[in-house]
Amino acid sequence: MIGMNPRYLRQSQLRDFGPEGQARLLRARVLVVGAGGLGCGALPYLAAAGVGTIGIVDDDRVELGNLHRQVLYTTAETGEAKVVAAARRLRAMNPEISIREYPIRIDGSNAAALLADYDVVVDATDNFQTRFLLDSVCADLGKPLVFGAISDFEGQIAVLHHRDADGVSASYRDFFEEAPRAGEARGCAEAGVLGVLPGIVGALQAAEVLKLISRCGAPLRAGMLTYSAITQETRFFRLPARRRESLDRPESAPPTREPIREISPEEFERMLGAESFAIVDVREIGETPSIPGIAHERYPLSRFTAGLPETDHSRILFVCRTGRRSRQAAEIFATRSEEGKTLFNLRGGVVGWIAHRERNA
């Protein structure tokens, strides 16, 4: 029996896991998209745990600047394809499992074919375009997607396209409505990253995969976990999508007390010089946070269902990239905050504001 294999004995002895959970792992097929920091954090634990078939997708090569966080690789492997180096290391760790190598870039032409052969997909990528692609394909194929992301000192983890007890299945678009345009999101090269952070987040992703496959415990469904390496604080935020809002809000919830005021960039400019108000930017980790030259608070939309931004101001302006997520944030704030607040939404968002400034420079 696989559960009695000495390699997996301590794991098979776990209550609610047992030999049956170990057998499910051996039969499972998991595709990890990305062999960078997050992938290097997740892959060793998936291999060591006994996931029967692991696919690795990445078209990148090992660079010296990767090594402080991508611990599957060595200095001698600089210049080698990451999937080749990673597969060699994983096979040495556990020769009882199968490792499949895909040294290619995943895109719309090959994603569906790659994902179709796997039970669970791990998003260990570092760009919004691929994340949106994986989200769409997993939704179409009905594949659970274990998402992870890092920026600076903070990470995010979520299990997507896997229904919870209420029948609600989160998608990436529930947290991020649209991808930032080129140049509006910072990667590790621009923002930097603490070396241990992707290892921690990747290991948490591996834990979610093992729970999904073994049916042990409850996956992180219908919400997102955030982790701070600075404070060692973890928080779980319930799904902020309208579907979750409609489930959580009582039928007797009061309507918005005052219509949210949509203002143009021109009106915003006039307000800056004449009125006192708070500005709340609701964009998420990885998106360019600054509103050039204007003091503001950062409070991502994903946190709104756990709590609201605190401010003494009675007038609050919400902003995001294009004005859509900030409108949603204002609507949530309006139904849950105390009375006496006047709420504004910047129409066109920061993109519209920057365009206005450039036209009038």
Image (tube, rainbow, N blue to C red):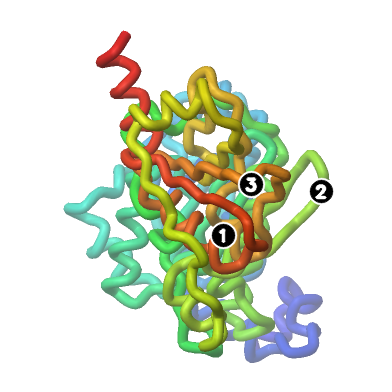
**What's under tag 1, amino acid-wise?**
Phe
Marker disc for residue 169: none
- The numbered mark at residue 333 is 1
Measure how far apart labels 1 and 3 are at the Cα level.
12 Å
SS for dot 1: helix
| Residue beneath the point at 33% across and 36% down | 264
Q: Is residue 58 left or right of residue 72?
A: left
Vertical placement of 171 versus 86: above or below? below
Q: Where does the C terminus fall, quadrant-wise? A: top left
- Residue 97 is at least partly visible in this image: no
Instruction: Name the residue at 69% across, 33% down.
Output: 194
Where does residue 5 sit, x and y in percent of width and height? 71, 80
The image's mark for residue 232 is 2
Is residue 165 placed above or below 203 in the rendered structure? below
Q: Is residue 88 left or right of residue 297?
A: left
Q: Is residue 267 visible?
A: yes
Amino acid type shown at disc 2: Gln
**Mark 1 to mark 2 CA distance (whole Å):** 28 Å
Find out whether the residues at labels 3 and 2 contact each other: C-beta distance under 8 Å.
no
Q: Earlier in the sequence, mark 3 or mark 2?
A: 2
- Give the x, y percent position of residue 92: 61, 52
Q: Earlier in the sequence, mark 1 or mark 2?
A: 2
Return the disc, 1 or 3, that comes first in the chain's sequence.
3
Quarter-wise, where is residue 195 in the image? top right
Residue located beneath label 3 in the image: 314
